[in-house]
Image: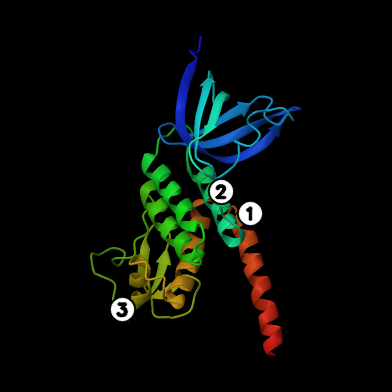
Amino acid sequence: MTSQRRVQQQPGYILHHRPFRDTSQILDIVTRDHGKVAVVARGSRGSKSRLAGVLRPFLPLKVSWVSKSDLGTLTGAEAAGVPAGMVGDAMLSAYYLNELLINFLHRFDPQPEIFALYERVLHALVGSRDVAAILRSFELEFLSLLGYAVNLDHEFGSRNRLDADQDYEYRMEQGPVPVNRSEGVLVFKGSTLRAIASESFDDPVILKAANRLMREIIAFHLGGKELKSRKVLMELHRGRIAPARSRNQ
């Protein structure tokens, strides 16, 4: 017989929610000490539920649940701070963080450093105009904490430091490989890769290159799965750029 597990007042954030039966919902929650968990919040969608204003993304919570299987039952939730007040790109970027955690984290695998990183980046997004730079820094640290560190320091197969003037192709599971061409989705100057490693994202050229590199690396680790929030962000930015071009023509 499977024993019941009870967790009380665990720091956490809701990553995703979906309806379950008439008035309940299933929550995916990232917690500090228990990793990613899934729980049923019974009656939480009802008009008289006391949890209606609490069970929402980007609000720090103290959550309690019981479980006998992979799917637990929420027994309590209360706000442990103020919600991260974000709008526009910052809000979409926060949903992108949630999608990354949902797709990369394993259930019941505690990752307190990732939890702290997630919380720190949520606060950084509030009111920031450097959303893209914040996301690239997050991606680099996130992958490193997961054990997928991006090698931007030395050539594949050697300990030779990247030559600033050499062209390299970044190859998955290998890293920078010297090539005799300057074209290609994952071809960069050594100086560019070194600048990405040092997070010199105040330079728009470096930031754009980092976006290209990290998009391909994350897609590789996701097996090509497209993240909804990232797709929306890209479409919004295309929409902003196209009118500007038409006005200049």
**Residue at the limit of the structure toward the bottom, as seen here:** 249
Check contact, mark 1 vs mark 3: CB within 8 A.
Answer: no
Residue under pointer 2 = 99
SS at badge 3 = loop
Check contact, mark 1 vs mark 2: CB within 8 A.
Answer: yes
Residue under pointer 3 = 164
Give coordinates of residue 156: x percent, y percent: 31, 64
Q: How far apart are the alpha carbons under marks 3 and 2?
A: 35 Å
Residue under pointer 1 = 228
Q: Nearer the viewer, residue 230 or 93?
A: 93
Q: Amino acid at mark 2?
A: Glu
Q: Nearer the viewer, residue 139 or 216?
A: 139
Q: Nearer the viewer, residue 219 or 114?
A: 114
Mark found first going from the N terminus, 3 or 2: 2
Give coordinates of residue 14: x percent, y percent: 55, 39
**Residue at the limit of the structure toward the top, as seen here:** 1
